[in-house]
Image (cartoon, rainbow, N blue to C red):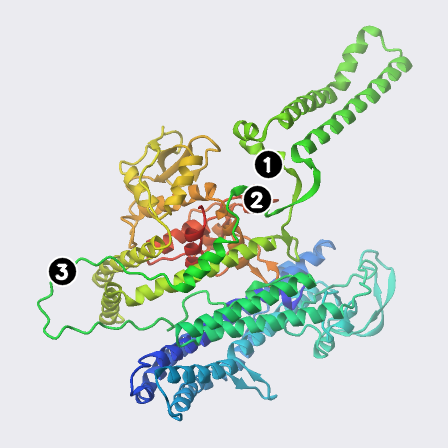
C-alpha cells in the first residue's frame, strides 16, 4: 500500500532549507535592531544599516536558491521510487511475471522532473518578495520607534520588541496566494513539497501496478480521518478505467468472474479532496475475491483531537519564532516560558486523548547553523598608541553560565533517573506483581519438565504395546526403548539441571546473586514486559518517558550551547583566528594551490583548540572534569590484535580529560582494569565484570589531522573511551537510542536502516554495519547495533555519543553532526553519572 503520508520523510530536507532561511532572516533583523540600543542616534544608525542588511539577506537567499532545486528533485524521485517498491511488494504474492514487470520497470524520469519543476516554479516565484519583505519589516520597526516620544532606552527597547513581535507573528517571509490565503514561505513550501512527494509516491505506485495489469485500488481506513477523506474509506477506485458495476476476474482463480462496485477513479477522488496534503490514508492494490474492504471506519472525535494537537503544535512553533526574534535576554526568557507552557498543554492533551506526540512537529527543524545566522565577529579597536606586537599566549577562556542554563540543568536533574536500574525499569511494566522473573523461570521449567516426563511416559507405553504386538524378544527391548526415548531423556536431564539452578538462585539474597551472577540480578524483580511503542510498520519506538527525559537533556544542552556560542563570539582569540582564516580564503580566490591549502590548515587547528578549550571551560563551570589515574595495562597480542603503541598511556590520559570527574569515579567502582592493545580498526569491548579491552589505532597510521586533540589517535582514544563510559554511565545508552530514533522518525514512521557499505562503497565498512542515515553530516553517526538486542534496543551501544565527542572537543574540519548533536553532548556530559 502507499500513502502520501509515507513519503513525508522526503519533505524534511526541503522544509529545513526554507525554515533555516526564515529564521536566519529573523535573527539577522533582531541582531541589527538590538545593536547600539543605548545610542541617542539609534534611529539614524538603523536606517543607515539597511544596505548591509540587504547584502546579508541577499547572500542568504542566494544560498537558498542554490540548494532548493536538487533537494526538491531528490525528494520527488525518492517518493516515486517508494511508490514503485510498495507496488512490487503488493504483487509479489501473485505471478512471477507480474512481480518482475513491476521490479524491472524503470522510473518515470519525465514524471519526476515534471513534479519537481512544478514545485520549484511555484516556490521560486515568491523568492523575489522575500528580500523586500525583510527590509520592509526592518524599516517598519524603526519607523514605529521613531514615531514615538521616547522616555529612554527601555521604552525604545520595549517598543521595538512589540513591533517586531507583531511582524514576526505575521511571518517575515509572508505572502498572499492567488486564492487570498496568507502564508509563511516555509509553511507554503512545506505544503507544496508535501503535495508533490505525495503525488509522486502515489503515481509511482499506480504506474507500477498498471504495468503489472492491475487497474483497481482500495482506500484504507485511517484513524482520526478528516471530513474530506471520510467518504472514501474502504471504497474501490479505478486507476484509469470504468466506474460503477464492473465485472473483473478473480485475483487467484482463472476464469472466475466477480462483480465489484468501483466508486470513482483515483483522480476523481483526489480532486474531491482525498489524499490531500497531510493525508494519512493509503491505497493498495485491490485483488478481487481476496481483498476485504474495511467497515465502520468513522472517527470524528479522533479528528477533533488531532486538529487540537495541530493547533497546540503551531503555538509552540510560534513562540520559538518569537524567541529567535527576541532583542534581549528578558524577551527570550518570556518566549521560552510560553514554549514550555504550550508544551505542557500538549502533554495534557496527549495523555487525555491517547494520541501520539510527534515532537518533530514542535521543532524549528534547524539541522545546521542557518545560513548567515552567526553574528559577524567584531574587530577589537586598536589601542591609541600600539606598541610593536609580541607573541602573547592566549588567555584562559572566559565563559559565563547563564541563568537559563542553570535553570534548565536544575529542572532536568530533578526528573532524570539516576541509576541503571531506574533507567531499566522506566522501559518495563509489571505484568504479575506476585511473581518474580526467577519464580517465572522456575514455574515454566517445572511445567516443561512435567510435560516432557508425560511425553516419555506415553512414549514408553506406546513402545511396550508395540513390543507385545510384534512379539519383540525381551533381549532387544531395553536397547530399542533406550534409542526411542534418548532425545526426551536428554531434554529431561537438561530441564532438571535448569530447575535445580533456578530454584537455588530463587533462594539466594539479592546481593549475593548480583555478586555471583550479575547478569541475573534483574530476575529477582517482578515479572515485567517492555513498554516500547511501535510505528505503523511495527518498528520499535522509545517509551514516552524516555522522550521526556531526552527533552529535558536537550533543553539543558541548548541553553549551554547558547552560552558556548556567546563565549565564541566574545573571545578575542577566536575572533582573531576566524578573521585570519577568512583573510586567507579571500586571498586564495578561485585558483587554490597546495601552498594555499597548507597555509589555511596551519591556522585552522588553532581555532579548533581554542573553541574546544571554551567548551571544556563551560562544562567545568557546571561540574569538575578530567582524571588521570588509569587502571590499565598493555595486553598480550593475539590474532589481529597488535602490541600496545608506545604512547598509549598519553593517549588515554588526553582522552579521559573530556569526561566529568564523576564518570571516572563510576568507572573506578564498577569497571575494574583495562587492557590496551592496538588494531587496524580501533574498538572497545566490555569485559562483563572482568577486564575490559580497548584497541587503539595501530602505530604508524598516517592520517592528516586538523583538530583540537594532539593527533588523530588521541581523538580516537576519546571516542573509544566514550564506548567504555557508555557501558557504565546510567542513562547514556538509553538517551543515545532515543536521540537517534527521534532523528530517524518522521511523521510516526521510522526510516529503514541502510548499510554503510552502500552509502560509502569505497570505505572499509562491512555489509552488516547499518545506520539510520537521517540528515547527519556523516551517516556513521546513526550507526545501530540493535541486531544484538532486537527486543530491547536501548540496551545496546550506539555511535552518536562517541562521534559527538569528536565534534565537540575535536572540532576538526570533517564533522559528524550539527548543533543539535552538540546540544545533546553538552546535556549528557552536564547531567548524567552523578
> Which of disc 3 and disc 2 is earlier in sequence?
3
Pick the front one: 70 or 824: 824
Report if the CB atoms under discs 2 and 1 are less than 8 Å apart: yes
Pick the front one: 43 or 254: 43
Q: Is residue 716 left or right of residue 340?
A: left
Please tell me whether mark 1 sits on a helix, a strand or a loop.
helix
The residue lying furthest to the right in this view is: 469
Q: CA distance from mark 2 to mark 1?
A: 9 Å
- For disc 3, the neighbor class at 10 Å (few under 14, some 14 to 19, many from 20) is few
Q: Position of residue 249 (x, y in %)?
A: 83, 63
When asked about the image quadrant of residue 519, the answer is top right
> Which of disc 1 and disc 3 is earlier in sequence?
3
Q: Is residue 424 left or right of residue 255?
A: left
Pick the front one: 746 or 705: 746
Q: Is residue 254 left or right of residue 272?
A: right
Q: Which mark is residue 424?
A: 2
Please tell me whether mark 3 sits on a helix, a strand or a loop.
loop
Which residue is found at the position 69% from the left and 61% from the top?
A: 354
The residue singled out by tag 3 in the image is: 391
The residue singled out by tag 1 in the image is: 522
Q: Position of residue 803 (x, y in %)?
A: 41, 51
Query: For the N terminus, which image quadrant?
Result: bottom right
Q: Is residue 303 left or right of residue 742?
A: right
Amino acid at each position: 500500500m502507499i500513502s502520501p503520508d509515507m513519503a513525508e520523510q522526503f519533505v524534511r530536507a526541503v522544509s529545513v532549507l526554507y525554515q533555516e532561511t526564515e529564521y536566519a532572516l529573523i535573527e539577522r533583523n533582531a541582531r541589527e535592531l538590538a545593536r547600539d540600543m543605548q545610542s541617542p542616534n539609534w534611529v539614524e544608525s538603523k536606517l543607515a544599516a539597511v544596505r548591509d542588511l540587504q547584502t546579508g539577506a541577499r547572500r542568504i537567499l542566494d544560498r537558498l536558491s542554490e540548494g532548493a532545486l536538487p533537494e526538491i528533485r531528490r525528494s520527488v524521485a525518492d517518493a516515486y521510487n517508494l511508490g514503485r517498491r510498495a507496488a512490487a511488494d503488493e504483487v509479489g504474492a501473485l505471478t512471477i511475471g507480474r512481480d518482475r514487470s513491476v521490479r524491472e520497470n524503470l522510473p518515470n524520469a519525465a514524471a519526476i522532473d515534471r513534479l519537481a519543476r512544478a514545485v520549484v516554479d511555484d516556490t521560486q516565484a515568491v523568492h523575489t518578495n522575500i528580500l523586500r519583505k525583510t527590509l520592509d519589516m526592518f524599516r517598519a520597526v524603526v519607523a514605529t520607534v521613531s514615531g514615538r516620544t521616547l522616555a529612554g532606552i527601555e521604552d525604545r527597547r520595549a517598543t521595538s520588541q512589540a513591533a517586531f513581535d507583531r511582524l514576526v507573528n505575521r511571518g517575515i517571509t509572508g505572502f498572499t496566494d492567488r486564492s487570498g490565503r496568507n502564508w509563511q514561505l516555509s509553511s507554503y513550501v512545506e505544503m507544496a513539497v508535501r503535495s508533490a512527494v505525495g503525488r509522486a509516491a502515489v503515481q509511482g505506485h499506480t504506474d507500477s501496478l498498471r504495468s503489472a495489469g492491475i487497474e483497481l485500488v482500495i482506500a484504507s481506513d485511517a484513524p482520526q480521518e478528516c471530513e474530506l477523506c471520510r467518504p472514501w474509506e474502504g471504497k474501490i477506485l479505478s486507476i484509469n478505467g470504468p466506474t460503477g458495476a464492473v465485472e473483473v476476474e478473480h485475483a487467484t482463480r482463472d476464469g472466475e468472474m466477480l462483480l465489484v462496485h468501483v466508486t470513482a477513479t483515483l483522480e476523481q477522488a483526489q480532486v474531491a479532496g482525498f489524499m490531500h496534503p497531510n493525508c494519512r490514508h493509503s491505497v493498495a492494490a485491490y485483488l478481487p475475491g481476496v481483498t476485504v474492504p474495511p467497515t465502520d471506519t468513522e472517527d470524528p472525535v479522533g479528528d477533533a483531537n488531532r486538529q487540537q494537537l495541530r493547533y497546540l503544535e503551531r503555538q509552540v512553533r510560534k513562540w520559538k519564532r518569537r524567541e529567535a526574534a527576541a532583542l534581549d535576554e528578558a524577551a527570550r526568557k518570556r518566549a521560552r516560558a510560553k514554549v514550555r507552557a504550550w508544551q505542557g498543554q500538549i502533554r495534557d492533551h496527549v495523555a487525555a486523548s491517547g494520541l501520539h506526540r510527534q515532537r518533530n512537529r514542535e521543532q524549528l527543524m534547524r539541522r545546521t547553523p542557518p545560513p548567515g545566522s552567526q553574528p559577524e565577529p567584531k574587530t577589537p579597536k586598536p589601542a591609541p598608541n600600539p606598541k610593536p606586537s609580541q607573541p602573547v599566549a592566549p588567555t584562559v577562556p572566559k565563559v559565563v553560565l547563564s541563568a537559563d542554563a542553570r535553570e534548565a540543568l536544575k529542572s532536568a536533574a530533578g526528573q532524570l533517573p539516576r541509576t541503571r536500574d531506574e533507567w531499566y525499569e522506566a522501559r518495563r511494566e509489571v505484568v504479575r506483581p506476585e511473581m518474580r522473573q526467577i519464580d517465572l523461570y522456575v514455574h515454566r521449567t517445572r511445567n516443561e519438565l512435567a510435560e516432557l516426563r508425560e511425553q516419555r511416559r506415553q512414549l514408553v507405553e506406546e513402545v511396550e504395546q508395540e513390543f507385545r504386538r510384534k512379539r519383540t524378544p525381551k533381549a532387544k527391548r531395553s536397547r530399542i526403548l533406550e534409542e526411542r526415548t534418548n532425545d526426551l531423556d536428554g531434554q529431561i536431564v537438561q530441564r532438571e539441571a535448569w530447575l535445580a539452578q533456578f530454584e537455588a538462585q530463587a533462594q539466594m539474597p539479592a546481593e549475593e546473586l548480583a555478586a555471583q551472577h550479575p547478569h541475573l540480578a534483574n530476575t529477582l524483580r517482578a515479572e515485567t514486559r517492555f513498554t516500547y511503542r511501535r510505528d505503523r510498520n511495527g518498528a520499535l519506538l522509545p517509551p514516552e518517558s524516555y522522550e521526556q527525559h531526552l527533552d529535558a537533556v536537550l533543553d539543558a544542552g541548548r541553553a549551554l550551547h547558547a552560552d558556548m556560542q556567546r563565549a565564541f563570539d566574545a573571545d578575542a582569540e577566536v575572533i582573531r583566528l576566524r578573521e585570519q582564516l577568512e583573510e586567507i580564503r579571500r586571498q586564495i580566490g578561485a585558483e587554490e594551490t597546495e601552498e594555499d591549502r597548507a597555509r589555511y590548515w596551519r591556522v585552522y587547528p588553532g581555532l579548533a583548540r581554542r573553541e574546544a578549550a571554551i567548551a571544556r571551560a563551560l562544562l567545568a563551570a557546571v561540574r569538575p572534569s578530567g582524571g588521570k589515574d588509569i587502571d590499565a595495562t598493555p595486553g598480550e597480542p593475539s590474532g589481529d590484535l597488535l602490541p600496545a603503541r608506545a604512547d598509549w598511556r598519553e593517549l588515554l590520559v588526553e582522552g579521559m580529560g573530556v569526561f566529568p570527574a564523576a564518570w571516572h569515579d563510576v568507572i573506578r567502582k564498577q569497571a575494574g582494569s583495562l587492557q590496551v592493545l592496538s588494531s587496524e580498526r580501533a574498538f572497545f569491548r566490555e569485559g562483563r565484570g572482568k577486564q575490559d579491552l580497548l584497541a587503539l589505532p595501530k602505530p604508524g597510521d598516517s592520517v592528516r589531522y586538523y583538530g583540537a586533540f594532539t593527533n588523530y589517535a588521541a581523538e580516537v582514544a576519546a571516542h573509544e573511551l566514550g564506548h567504555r563510559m557508555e557501558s557504565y554511565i546510567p542513562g547514556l545508552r538509553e538517551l543515545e537510542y532515543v536521540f537517534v530514533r527521534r532523528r530517524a522518525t518522521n511523521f510516526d514512521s521510522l526510516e529503514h536502516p541502510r548499510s554503510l557499505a552502500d552509502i560509502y562503497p569505497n570505505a572499509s565498512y562491512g555489509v552488516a554495519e547499518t545506520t539510520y542515515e537521517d540528515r547527519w553530516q556523516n551517516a556513521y553517526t546513526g550507526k545501530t547495533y540493535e541486531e544484538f538486542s532486537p527486543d530491547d534496543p536501548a540496551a545496546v551501544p550506539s555511535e552518536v555519543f562517541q562521534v559527538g565527542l569528536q565534534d565537540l572537543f575535536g572540532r576538526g574540519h570533517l564533522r559528524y553532526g550539527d548543533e543539535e548533536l552538540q546540544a545533546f553532548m553538552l546535556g549528557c556530559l552536564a547531567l548524567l553519572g552523578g
